[in-house]
Image (cartoon, helix red, strand yellow):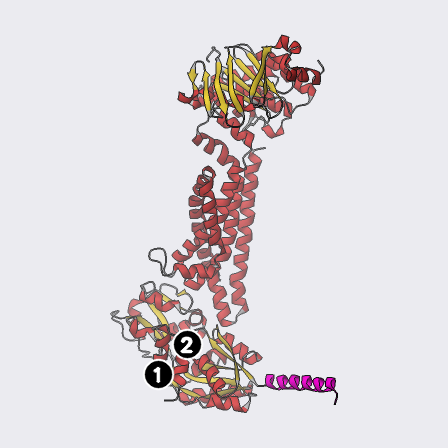
């Protein structure tokens, strides 16, 4: 397990029609929120960080290495990815889902079992109760907990989250944010959301995107006093 | 009665060989199509056109072709393979394309190679749809195989044609009823298989 | 008579005229589904048309029993049948071997069914057991030598008819190891020529026997009855039309039939053209 978290840098990154000359540097261990209106390019920016989207201009660096010249498969096995739709493999058990990346990395089965047991307990879905269940029989909240376990079990250096709690009810959302906060040390996190409250709760730094460009980049504590008009609209809309 | 059993045996054999071959050829072809849209369009159109050729005409076309043609079961099998391709290729394509976008995205993002994604995620999830395609192909093949008798291919169509020549309804039914029963049996068995697969997903 | 009355009378006259024309007798002519039968059916049709009768063609219908069922029910008015076939396959009577006896018996039975069994056209088309040249076989009895290895291939009728393959096996005491492959009759020649079958049941007047390098085995035990071709037509046929058909008696011998068959099967000429040429006064 690699205890080092990774830094991420987007240098003059453009994606045709979506992002324009985005420059963003994220230090190791930071927890950064990417917020903005729908269509601002937050998800696209996120997906350049694990190579799911190839920029049409500029370069992306993870831990100093350009993605264009790196083995993306290896990179992805050390990058956690949590999305709104979760994307659990329906034909596999919960345990098999969680064990996916460790198996790809060649961990011995006992080690996987131990890690899964610990992680799933911490997330609130104990292995003994949930291990053999099929994903389709779980509630939305339980499924996303499995999603978190699956993304975190191998100790990734970087964790990318795309509105992970967007489809869940407010109470479950709150619970999962707490789980998240408890787990966030030791890994660099980029968290896309359009819920300002969530961003301020979970992250230390907030980057605001509009129409493919960064319009503000402040520590979370300072966001409510950020003069940028769009930021103020967000604050007003969130009634903070 | 012996005749009926022999004809049924022949019928099952040519259908089984043809559908198996069409599956072995059609599933990879379908997979290939998911990767390339231009190819997919061309392949689907070709297979569609084959489907529209009346069976007796197709048998007739194949007879003069060396190696695969001639009179007998081999030509019949070739024709049946061609007819079985459409359901199988199309269902493979649909099945794989139908895999949940989120599941595919999560798989790629976790670092599965293209091969791992295909064999561990896409194919297993597409399997019920593919089996449905095989089922449809089998039922069609059982019907078309009755025409094989016109070109010496044997099978239950033989009894039907003899019955027609002799204006003997009993003989016609001796061929037609087992053929219908075969089709129903194949349909039921393969639907069972589809459901069994779905059940393992819980 | 006023303008409108004159027009009314004209219309009535036209209708009656059309009606009268439509009443010209139409003879429905059928045939079985092999070349010779189609040629003969076309011959009947053209002969009728030359005599001023209307002919409706239903050629390539199916086998013997389909045609028989059709003419008995009145869907057909005329077609060409073979005496031996009529005797055994249709009437289910025991075999006779003198040609006159066969024809007389058939004519008698047919008359009882309201059908007229016409005079012979002049040729005998018997079943021919055919093999490839160079097989070393001369008679049907010789087949005993190859009964374990030869693959027979027949059309549906010969395979199924009691006076076909089954009767032949019994008569010659043969036991073939391989059951016959059945297929559309027209394909059997091709199958034999391309070594996919070794023995077929063709017709003695077929056009392709020589051209494909095939040989007819002699029926040394006289299993097959005579198959004299004759026109069968419904007894209630219009006099003018039936006379036209009767005039065809004795107009085709074995060699001529073989030649006509070859024109179509070997030289791929149109059936209508071949018949027209045949009927042209020389």
Magenta segment: C1-23
Label 2 and label 1: CA atoms lie apart by: 15 Å
Q: Residues within 10 Å of mark 1 (few under 14, many from 20)?
A: some
- Decide which of A51, B184 is in the foreground and name it: A51
- Quadrant of the image for the N terminus of chain C? bottom right
x, y (%) of residue C144? 30, 70
- Decide which of A231, A26 is in the foreground and name it: A231
Residue shown at the point (66%, 23%) measured from the top left: A168
Q: Residue furthest right?
A: C2
Was residue A154 drawn as part of the magenta stretch in this picture?
A: no
- Decide which of A185, A225 is in the foreground and name it: A225
- Quadrant of the image for the C terminus of chain C? bottom left
Q: Quarter of the image holding residue B170?
A: bottom right
What residue is shown with label 2? C271
Q: Chain of mark 2?
A: C
Q: Residues within 10 Å of mark 2 (few under 14, many from 20)?
A: many
Q: Which SS class for mark 2?
A: helix
**What is the number of the mark on residue A111?**
none
Was residue C12 drawn as part of the magenta stretch in this picture?
A: yes
What residue is shown with label 1? C256
How many numbered marks does the figure carry? 2
Q: Residue C206, can we see it?
A: no
Residue shown at the point (46%, 83%) measured from the top left: C46
Q: Which SS class for mark 1?
A: helix
Question: Tag 1 or tag 2, which sits nearer the N-term?
Answer: 1
Q: Quarter of the image holding residue A202?
A: top right
- Residues at marks 2 and 1, common chain? yes
x, y (%) of residue A240? 70, 13
x, y (%) of residue B19? 45, 49
């Amino acid at each position: 397990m690699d205890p080092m978290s990774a830094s991420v840098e987007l240098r003059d990154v453009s994606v045709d029609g979506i992002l324009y000359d985005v420059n963003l540097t994220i230090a190791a261990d930071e927890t950064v929120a990417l917020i903005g209106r729908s269509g601002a390019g937050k998800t696209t920016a996120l997906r350049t960080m694990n190579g799911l989207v190839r920029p049409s201009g500029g370069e992306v660096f993870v831990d100093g290495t350009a993605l264009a010249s790196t083995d993306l498969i290896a990179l992805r096995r050390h990058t956690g990815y949590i999305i709104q739709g979760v994307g659990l493999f329906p034909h596999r058990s919960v345990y098999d889902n969680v064990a996916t990346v460790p198996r790809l990395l060649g961990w011995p089965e006992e080690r996987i079992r131990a890690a899964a047991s610990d992680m799933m307990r911490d997330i609130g879905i104990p292995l003994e109760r949930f291990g053999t269940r099929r994903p389709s029989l779980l509630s939305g909240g339980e499924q996303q907990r499995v999603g978190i376990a699956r993304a975190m079990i191998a100790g990734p250096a970087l964790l990318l989250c795309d509105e992970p709690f967007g489809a869940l009810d407010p109470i479950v959302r709150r619970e999962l944010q707490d789980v998240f906060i408890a787990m966030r040390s030791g890994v660099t996190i980029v968290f896309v959301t359009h819920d300002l409250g969530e961003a301020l709760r979970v992250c230390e730094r907030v980057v605001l995107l509009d129409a493919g460009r960064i319009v503000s980049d402040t520590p979370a504590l300072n966001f409510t006093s950020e003069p940028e008009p769009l930021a103020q609209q967000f604050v007003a809309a969130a009634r903070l | 009665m012996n005749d009926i059993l022999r004809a049924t045996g022949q019928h099952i054999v040519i259908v089984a060989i043809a559908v198996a071959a069409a599956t072995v050829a059609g599933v990879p072809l379908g997979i290939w199509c998911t990767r390339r849209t231009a190819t997919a369009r061309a392949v689907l159109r070709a297979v569609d056109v084959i489907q529209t050729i009346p069976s007796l005409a197709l048998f007739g076309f194949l007879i003069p072709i060396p190696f695969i043609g001639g009179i007998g079961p081999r030509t019949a099998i070739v024709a049946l393979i061609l007819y079985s391709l459409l359901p199988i290729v199309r269902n493979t394509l649909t099945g794989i394309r139908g895999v949940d976008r989120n599941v595919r995205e999560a798989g790629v993002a976790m670092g599965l190679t293209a091969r791992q994604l295909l064999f561990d995620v896409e194919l297993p999830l597409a399997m019920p749809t593919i089996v449905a395609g095989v089922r449809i192909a089998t039922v069609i093949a059982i019907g078309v195989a009755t025409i094989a008798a016109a070109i010496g291919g044997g099978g239950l169509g033989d009894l039907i044609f003899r019955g027609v020549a002799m204006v003997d309804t009993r003989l016609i039914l001796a061929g037609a009823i087992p053929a219908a029963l075969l089709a129903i049996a194949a349909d039921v068995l393969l639907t069972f298989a589809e459901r069994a697969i779905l059940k393992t997903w819980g | 008579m006023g303008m409108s009355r004159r027009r009314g009378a004209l219309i009535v006259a036209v209708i009656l005229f059309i009606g009268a024309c439509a009443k010209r007798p139409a003879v429905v002519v059928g045939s079985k589904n092999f070349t010779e039968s189609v040629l003969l059916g076309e011959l009947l049709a053209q002969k009728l048309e030359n005599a001023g009768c209307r002919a409706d063609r239903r050629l390539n219908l199916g086998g013997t029993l389909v045609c028989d069922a059709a003419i008995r029910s009145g869907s057909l008015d005329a077609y060409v049948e073979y005496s031996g076939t009529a005797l055994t396959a249709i009437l289910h009577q025991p075999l006779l071997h003198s040609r006159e006896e066969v024809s007389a018996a058939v004519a008698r039975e047919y008359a009882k069914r309201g059908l007229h069994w016409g005079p012979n056209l002049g040729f005998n088309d018997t079943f021919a057991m055919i093999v490839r040249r160079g097989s070393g076989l001369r008679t049907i009895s010789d087949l005993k030598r190859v009964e374990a290895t030869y693959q027979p291939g027949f059309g549906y009728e010969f395979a199924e008819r009691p006076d076909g393959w089954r009767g032949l096996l019994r008569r010659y005491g043969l036991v073939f190891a391989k059951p016959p492959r059945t297929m559309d009759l027209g394909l059997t020649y091709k199958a034999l020529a391309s070594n996919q079958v070794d023995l077929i049941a063709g017709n003695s007047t077929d056009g392709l026997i020589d051209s494909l390098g095939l040989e007819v085995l002699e029926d040394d035990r006289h299993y097959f009855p005579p198959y004299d071709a004759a026109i069968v037509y419904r007894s209630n046929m219009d006099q003018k039309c039936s006379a036209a058909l009767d005039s065809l008696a004795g107009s085709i011998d074995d060699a001529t039939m073989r030649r006509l068959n070859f024109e179509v099967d070997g030289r791929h000429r149109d059936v209508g053209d071949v018949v027209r040429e045949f009927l042209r006064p020389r």
